Amino acid sequence: MRGFAPHLLLIDCPDRTGLVHTITGVLFRRGYNVLANHEFVDRERGHFFMRTEFSGDTEPDAALGELRAALPDATIRLSTAGERTTVVLVTKEHHCLGDLLIRHAYGELGAQIKAVIGNHATLEPLAARFGVPFHHVGHEGRERPAHEDALAAAIDSYAPEYLVLAKYMRVLTPAFVARYRSRIINIHHSFLPAFIGASPYRQAFERGVKIIGATAHFVTDSLDEGPIIAQSVIPVDHTYTAAAMAQAGRDVEKIVLANALRLVFEERVFINGNRTVIFD
């Protein structure tokens, strides 16, 4: 079909009879072609979620207005396909940042990395190899509010849609999280909810686990307890030391983070309380 690039219609609202008919009916009457459609009802909450990709020969402003009039209690967003903008926050570990920079360089990330910001300067040479600006916003000698103010100033100069914590090893305050609500994605080196906080591989080793994993989640005020986007595990056994577990876990972390970012950047993730609805 000729016309504008495909649009993504994202709707969530209290569930009731006829929602799919109402939504697709508006698109049909306005002459749009539905390319893909996914819907889900959380029966416990009585809440409806829908992701619809459609195209047509006119801008969808009128259709959006009609939908909002028909569904006054709905959250309705319209997004266009294309790369998102992000800033990546790091400390000293290179593996997740390196993977993201390679994917970015070859057009596989689905986003433009506008800058990398570190509370240490360790990874500045890595960012420089890929031509990505690096900002060292050190925390030493600064109170936490002052450090986060400086961090926010560096971030906001790029106006990113998302922040990615690629092994950023600082706990963020509620005030900072609120500034970027539902826009901060973290990779945690554990299969949550097990082994939250620091040194999860040491915790896993001491517990004698038989699988280790990684979890990508949105950041909230509660440490490592935000809505989960993606997880994966690999088997381990008694021959693994804590260091060997950490090395194996790094490969899982890279894959899980990349997968989570793909889902978010393609607008496939709805936050549903402290859970997620994912259309993949």
Image (cartoon, grey):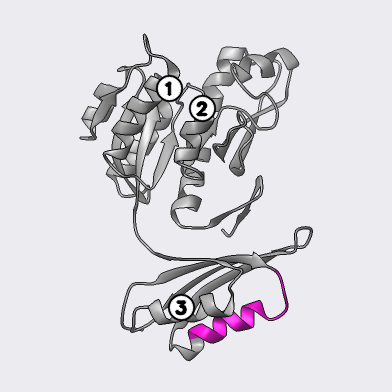
Mark 1–mark 3 CB contact (< 8 Å): no
Quadrant of res 4: bottom left
In the drawing, what numbered circle is on residue 145?
1
User: Which residue appears at 72% of the width and 25% of the height?
Assistant: 210
Quadrant of res 157: top left
Mark 3–mark 2 CB contact (< 8 Å): no
Residue 76 versus residue 198: which sits nearer the camera? 76
The three-letter code of the residue at mark 2 reads Thr
Mark 1–mark 2 CB contact (< 8 Å): yes
Q: Position of residue 238 (x, y in %)?
A: 71, 16
Question: Which comes sooner in the sequence, label 3 or label 2?
Answer: 3
Q: Position of residue 114 (x, y in %)?
A: 28, 41
Task: Please give left or right for residue 215 compared with residue 98 in the image.
Answer: right
Question: Which comes sooner in the sequence, label 1 or label 3?
Answer: 3
User: Which residue appears at 71% of the width and 12% of the height?
Assistant: 206
Residue 250 versus residue 111: which sits nearer the camera? 111
According to the image, label 2 marks what residue? 173
Please say whether residue 60 is visible from this viewpoint.
no
Q: Is residue 23 highlighted in magenta?
A: yes
Quadrant of res 98: top left
The three-letter code of the residue at mark 1 reads Pro
The part of the chain drawn in magenta is: 15-27
Q: Secondary structure at mark 3?
A: helix
According to the image, label 3 marks what residue? 65
Residue neighbourhood size for the residue with mark 2, other residues' Cα within 10 Å, grouped as few (<14), some (14–19), many (≥20): some
Q: Secondary structure at mark 2?
A: loop
Q: Main secondary structure of the magenta part?
A: helix
Task: Please give left or right for residue 118 compared with residue 187 in the image.
Answer: left
In the drawing, what numbered circle is on residue 218?
none
The three-letter code of the residue at mark 3 reads Gly
Please say whether residue 193 is visible from this viewpoint.
yes
